[in-house]
Amino acid sequence: MSAVAEPKTEKNYLNVDYSIKSWLTTLDHKRIGILYLVAITIFFMVGGFMALLIRTELATPQGDLLSSDQYNRAFTMHGVVLIFFFLLPSTPAVLGNFLLPIMIGARDVAFPKLNLASWYAFMIGGTLGVISLVLGGIDTGWTFYAPYSSNFSNTPVVWAIAGAFVAGFGNIATAVNFIVTIHKMRAPGLTWFRLPLFVWAQYATAVIGVLGTPVIAITIFLVAFERLTGMGIFDPARGGDPILMQHLFWFYSHPAVYIMILPAMGVTSEMIAAASQKRVFGYEFVAFSSLAIAIIGFLVWGHHLFVSGQSVFAGLVFSVLTFIVAIPSAIKTFNWVATMYKGNLQMNTPMFWAVAFLGLFLIGGLTGLFLSSLATDIHLHDTYFVVAHFHYIMVGGAIIGFIGGLHFWWPKITGRMYPESWGKAGAIMVFTGFSLTFLPQFVLGQLGMPRRYHTYPEEFQILHVLSTGGAYLLGFAMTTIIVYLAWSAKYGKPAPPNPWKAKGLEWETPSPPPTENFTYKVVVTEPAYNYHKDSGGHH
């Protein structure tokens, strides 16, 4: 990179104005990223509490803590809160908002006012979701399957649907902002194949968000409309088609899995490249694999309907396509390992999180192949095997990638370092707690234990006890991480501009960055991850 020298005096975004009004009216993309971080942390704690409630109930075979109705509400609200109000906005809205403009040499996103409006849409949606929780929670499952949700449930379904619906507008606005920003605001010399892989991942995610989110918005709107008016859309008793609802729901919701996991993959590429001090092996393949996942991801939704009434031929087609969509993820995994091979590996905290991501995501991906096959899916459908697979992708992949990214860029965000020993201990505890929670659930599912039951035969108790113990360890680990990161933001050692010796424009700014990101004109003159120039790494 080349640039005009920086002036000696500058104000970073944290020191301009600390008033609440300045934060709630800010147009600075970095502050909006922080606002999202605070909000999703609160939602994460609410959803996490629900998870511990569920696992506490399942420690014994009898329903002695929650009734069946209370249990239905607990697992539904766990899913609704963590998927719609944590996982979907986590990495794109927090790390994407904070880092994307800096990574491409821009001073902000293309539409700063729309960026702030997207946060308000998210907060209004989250508030409506919380209202449904205060009113007793809903019992439909996070998928809102009709006709139960549109006709029979006596819970405040419309409030939760309204929350997800409004929050979706925030996701669409953020996605539009990112697409335009990447297309139109890159620094001179920053060609597409000089972009960091994190930016490629955010771009692919934004494309999915723009194309897919309107479909789920219309679908859940129709569920609420049928519930409020009695018109037959999905309820067969009224002339509707419940299978149509599932097709519409999963046409978005399977690509939504990639909205959650693709940004975490981009984070992992950055962490592994920095820790290996090497250019990412097969950079172009990793970049294009993000786009391939985005495109093929729209063609596999029918694997959720293998036992729901679609034809065997359609199931066969969706099965083949699902195996195909695994290929781009396999390409990424192979290339990450090849990047580490013969690299000058730095086993710092971000690398611990990257390794945890690799191990857990690999298990999640491989177990997905069992559910992609019609024969094995008939046995495993709606069992704890599905629960375990889903969480290995969503928690083992998406959440661990997000937390790893927080550890990687935390010095840049706050200007402070967290204690390395605590960061590594956090990664080890999360990996251990997560594995103890969900590995037994693969066995439970293979033995035929159905999900969403709050009582079960006594012979399954030992596996459930292991799972519950793991959940408490995982909860303790997550709480520890929140505490030491919050502590370090105020009391940590001042961070240098580039503590990991990483490459990228964000590491050429002070920590934390100036309000306008760059007080000089940025001109990019070298490829991404050009480590070989300084450290003898491979180009």
Image (cartoon, helix red, strand yellow):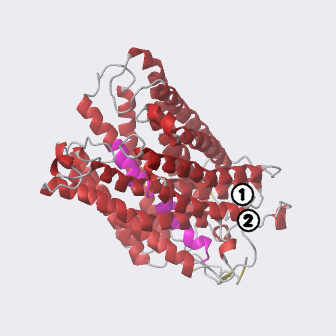
Measuring from the top left, give residue 365's x and y in whole percent.
Answer: 58, 44
Front residue of 293 and 273: 293
Q: Is residue 253 covered in magenta?
A: no
The image shows a total of numbered marks equal to 2
Measuring from the top left, give residue 176's x and y in whole percent.
Answer: 45, 73
**Mark sitting on residue 106:** none
Residue tagged 2: 529
Where disc 2 sits, the SS reads: loop
Check if mark 1's residue and mark 2's residue have beta carbons within 8 Å: yes
Q: Is residue 102 covered in magenta?
A: yes
Q: Quadrant of the N terminus?
A: bottom right
Front residue of 429 and 443: 443
Instruction: Tell me if 470 is positioned left or right of 227 in this view.
Output: right
Q: Earlier in the sequence, mark 1 or mark 2?
A: 1
Relative to 250, does residue 366 appear above or below in the rendering?
A: above
The residue range painted magenta reads 77-105
Residue found 41% across the figure and 54% down from its top: 253
Front residue of 115 and 421: 115
Measuring from the top left, give residue 96's x and y in whole percent.
Answer: 52, 64
Mark 2 nearby-residue class (10 Å; few <14, some 14–19, many ≥20) = many
Residue found 39% across the figure and 15% down from its top: 458
Q: Quadrant of the C terminus?
A: bottom right
Where disc 1 sits, the SS reads: helix
The amino acid type, in three-letter code, at marker 1 is Ala
- Report the Cα–Cα distance between label 1 and label 2: 7 Å
Mark 1 nearby-residue class (10 Å; few <14, some 14–19, many ≥20) = many
Q: Main secondary structure of the magenta part?
A: helix
Res. 126 in view = yes
Residue tagged 1: 273
Measuring from the top left, give residue 532's x and y in whole percent.
Answer: 83, 64
The amino acid type, in three-letter code, at marker 2 is Tyr
Q: Where is residue 139, by image quadrant?
A: top left
